[in-house]
Amino acid sequence: MLKGGGGPFLGGDGPLLGGDGPLLGGAGPLLGGDGPFLGGGGPLPGGAGPLLGGDGPLPGGDGPLSGDGGFLLPDVAGETLCCTDVGSSELGLRCPNHLGHSKKGVVFMRRTRRAIEVTACGLLFALLMPAMAGAGGEVVAWGGNDDGQCDVPEPNSDFAGVAAGRYHSLGLKFNGSIVAWGDNDEGQTNLPSPNADFVAIAAGEDHSLGLKSDGSIVAWGQNDHGQCDVPSPNTDFVALAGGRYHDLGLKADGSIVAWGYNEWGQCNVPPPNTDFVVVAAGNYHNLGLKSDGSIVAWGLGPPGQSGWPDFGQCNVPAPNADFVAVAGGQYHSLGLKSDGLIVAWGHCDWGQCDVPEPDMDFVTVAGGYNHNLGLKSDGSIVTWGSNNHGQCDVPGPNTDFVAIAGGAFHSLGLRAMFGPGDLDCDGDVDFDDIDPFVLAMQSHAGYEAAYPDCDYHNGDCNDDGFVDFDDIDAFVAILSGG
């Protein structure tokens, strides 16, 4: 599905990353040689581009997202996505030391908890996060659980993404299927058939959405405001977001399509409807991130709207620049700056605008009703705001998280999982694991010094609590597929 030669996601002929695909293909509109986003003539990666350019705010030597480690780019010479080596990129970017070339011709993350670094380009996060997560992940859920929204179905493994509605949750599997659990009063957990080929998910209050690998959006659940009626043509979508009773879809050309409840103008995208790279939705307002790093906000909030107070959730604080990610809460908004700092504004009665110190090293952000989650570059989650249902009490161990989502009164985190024998943390047990396995048997400290982002205990292949010569037979069996 994901990495096969003819698979729909990363396959050689697939629509997303394939050689001729519309999104990341050699001539595709997003990452292709002439594409508007990351293409050679596009606005982003040019020599002075705001996101990936040589003088842009993200890949500078001191930035937490790219910094010394560089960034992720499509191979400038080939059809597949790959990580450019130091000195080999025409854009002068460097390959993070936790990235490498897989034998299947696709970039993989050597340590999934660092995968969020690709949020610096919002589209890459939405499209490539499933490909980055190596061996898959488990979903951790906490907070209000009256409707079972925190009871993750078994097997809790192989997840590549998460999304949270009011009282329900969604998980995207590596095989392109969706798992849904929690409240189903409106059919929001009744998965559409065929449950396959999904590459991204989102949730509204009582409805759910999935983005297919062919660029179409599927929506199901509550539909009393038309929030499940995706406008035609239902093609060329690359990202999506769910509000309370409305939805957003980002097109490959950088425009936003909005549908559903429009009482507060949340479906009236402000002109010019171009150059958007990320979308997010609150209850009745929206946020769109432009390719120049600025945020456009619309819907409930501007002065002059009667019947509801103006909490200021659409008043983006100055300077409105250098943003790389956005999120919406009930009546508040969040933006992540390129230096890893989170800015919050709008309704703050529950402390949801008081980002905990130190406000730094964040790599993505998510909003619930009146609480927020921020994911740090070390894989830990920081929460703040209302905690009346324990939605801010992250279960331990608070580490190795790669994705987050906020519901009304519950929270979700996707934690990376690496299995026994995977000593180089690339998601596979193969001959590349032999040297680190031998090193782990010889010296715990030596292994951790050589592989600081990997888990020493993956060498405990016989599960006896020790990494020693007794693990050799079990390691060989795993290596040989036994």
Image (cartoon, helix red, strand yellow):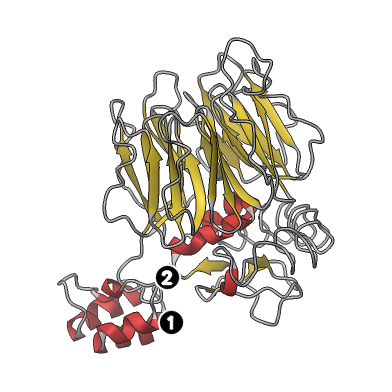
Three-letter code, disc 1:
Asp
Residue at 79% x, 36% y: name it.
Answer: 273
Residue at 69% x, 24% y: name it.
Answer: 267
- Disc 1 is placed on an element classified as helix
Q: Viewed as shown, does residue 29 lie left or right of 459? A: right
Residue 428 image label = 2
Which residue in the structure is indicated by mark 1?
A: 432
- Residue 190, horizontal then vertical, whole percent: 44, 27
Residue 122 image label = none
Residue at 23% x, 74% y: name it.
Answer: 460
- The answer to whether 450 is drawn above or below residue 64 in the figure is below
- Residue 105, horizontal then vertical, whole percent: 60, 71
- Residue 96, horizontal then vertical, whole percent: 56, 73
Query: Disc 1 to disc 2, how far (Cα)?
Result: 9 Å
- Residue 131, horizontal then vertical, whole percent: 53, 59
Residue 9 in sight from this viewpoint: no
- Could you classify mark 1 by the number of other residues whose Cα lies within 10 Å: few (under 14), some (14-19), or many (20 or more)? few
Location of residue 12 (image quadrant): bottom right
Q: Are marks 1 and 2 in contact (CB under 8 Å)?
A: yes
Three-letter code, disc 2:
Asp
Residue 13 in sight from this viewpoint: yes
